[in-house]
Image: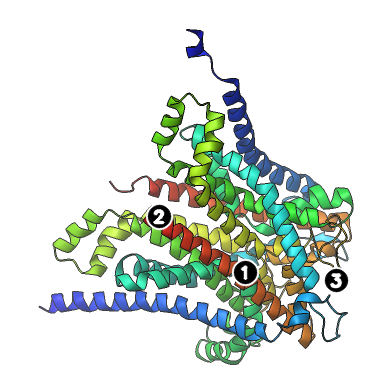
Amino acid sequence: MSTETKKPWGDSIFRGLTLSFAIGILLLFTAIVVSLWHESLPSIHKFGFSFLTSSAWNPVKDDFGALIAIVGTLISTLLAMLIAVPISIGVALFLAELAPEWMKAPFGTAIELLAAIPSIVYGMWGLFVLSPIMADHLQPWLADHFDFLPFFTGPAMGIGMLTAGLVLALMILPFIASVTRDVFLMVPQNLKEAAYGMGCTTWEVVRDIMIPYGKKGIAGAVFLGMGRALGETMAITFVIGNAYHLSWSLFAPGTSIASTLANEFTEADSDIYLSSLVELGLVLFLITFIVLGIAQMWLRRGNQGGGL
Amino acid sequence: MIRRQRRILTNRIVLGLSGAAATLGLVMLAWILGDVALRGMQAINWDFFTELPTPPGMVGGGVANDIVGTLLMTVAATCMSVPFGVLAGTWLSEFGRDSRLGSVIRYFSDILVSAPSIVIGVFVYLIIVRPSGHFSGWAGAVSLAIIMLPVVSRTTEEMLKLVPHELREAALALGAPYWKIMPQVIYRAAAAGMATGIMLAVARVAGETAPLLFTAMNSPYWMESMNEPMANLTVTLFNYAMSPYDDWQTKAWGAAFLITMAVLITTITTRLILRKRSKH
């Protein structure tokens, strides 16, 4: 009788062991935030809230502010999103619905391979291949035709915000495309068939059935790509120009939080310099945390059967 | 009739645009891979694999120590993250499937998967490099392991969930305790899937640079232990590509070629295995 209620002790240990490792992931996450925050304290005390609004970055005078790096991060990400989102949704539609069956596999694999190429290779390609093309062709063309806009002025150097945005767009395109494709593939077949049966064209099925059904998931995919773009380091460090400078012109070199860290972290020779860099890292971690958090929320809701 | 023609025309235009977007993706892939292969091949010779780097500005030499360093750190990172990730994934799949704690852990690990890898580098610098007083291969391996961990735990969870419940019930009915069923039945049933998940995680960190910049840093010498600054391909690629020397820039393309090939071959192989399995 007693054997029925007795739980084997081995199972309790096993359960406890696996639980402790699962909780370990949460602890790791907490440890990252706490250690970054702790190291940022000198900078937080010295500069306070004005760290976020000051455009100073002067290692000689130990005067630091995050504004230029934050703005640079946001602008390069925004540019990347403007370019990558429409293209990747197009790619996703093609892969999920429009492409003939025999084309789906090769195109799908190509997108997955684009996602697998290490970011440093994108950066290097951006510097040696894309930048010269930008300087010789695209930037002069933009300057000639859109000179009434403040965005396309100044010397065409190849490297700068615009090139950084392009390389970033190329990097996040496959992420957004493959997640969006999965969202589209979850649209129930019978909904689509019903619409086709009523005589809808493919585009009408996409516009009236697939996009409304998957809109949370698509938004999640877009935010996922945005989270990646915000924290991307190597692809940007090569081509952004690494200059502490705010400019309306997208041709001008700038900097981002991640590329500042990559360039300066090992050079920080004073405690407040290091502390300010760590605070930059903390700011980046918190921004991406929020963006990725929203992405996960939407992707999860999307997974739970959307409109039905 | 006009309305119908307009609908068909719109449809054609959208189909065309979407096809163009997909073609653009294919073209970019071919363009990047083509450049990497063409320029990378020029650097590839026997010395590239067997010699140490030359001092700045000198022609010749290779990246043998970098190849060994990257391999060692990736292996060390795998050894650290796989047991951790597999056990965590086991709890998520077997015990925490519908629990609140389970969904919290899942949420945070999914965020950690896409978290900026450079911040992981800063974290490891603060907890290992600075207290120990020097850059080291171990610190590099730990930062790669942190990046691998959530990927391993989430794929383990997904793969364990694919194992049919009846298999667990059958084993339980024979009187086996759970802790024996897991390794002897469930892990075995999910082994191929878990292995491919781990390989994808390896492929992902093999090309990582940002978390190594201030953990492993780099070194032009053969390592004597993992407890010192460690040569690795990606940081060398970064330094060489940013240098003003033609020979170093060529070598940077060579390193890029090597890394890209390794990562792509791993990715393609694992995807093929996954696809084959899912068809059965």
Q: State which tag comes first along the sequence, 2 or 1.
A: 1
Q: Residues within 10 Å of mark 1 (few under 14, many from 20)?
A: some
Residue B177 placed where, x, y %?
53, 26
The answer for how far apart the CA atoms under marks 3 and 2 are is 45 Å
Residue A47 placed where, x, y %?
78, 53
- Give the residue furthest to the left: B1
Q: Is residue A243 visible?
A: no
Front tag of 3 and 2: 2
Quadrant hosting residue B247: bottom right
Q: Residue at x 60, y 78 (%)?
A: A163
Q: Residues within 10 Å of mark 3 (few under 14, many from 20)?
A: some
Q: Residues within 10 Å of mark 2 (few under 14, many from 20)?
A: few
Residue B233 position (above or below residue B42): above
Q: Identify residue type, mark 2.
A: Ser
Q: Residue at x 76, y 65 (%)?
A: B68
Q: Is residue B19 left or right of residue B262?
A: left
The answer for how far apart the CA atoms under marks 2 and 1 are is 24 Å
Label 2 element class: helix
Chain letter of disc 1? B
Q: Residue at x 56, y 69 (%)?
A: B264
Q: State which tag comes first along the sequence, 1 or 3.
A: 3
Give the number of the disc on residue B278.
2
Give the number of the disc on residue B262.
1
Label 1 element class: helix
Q: Identify residue type, mark 1.
A: Ala
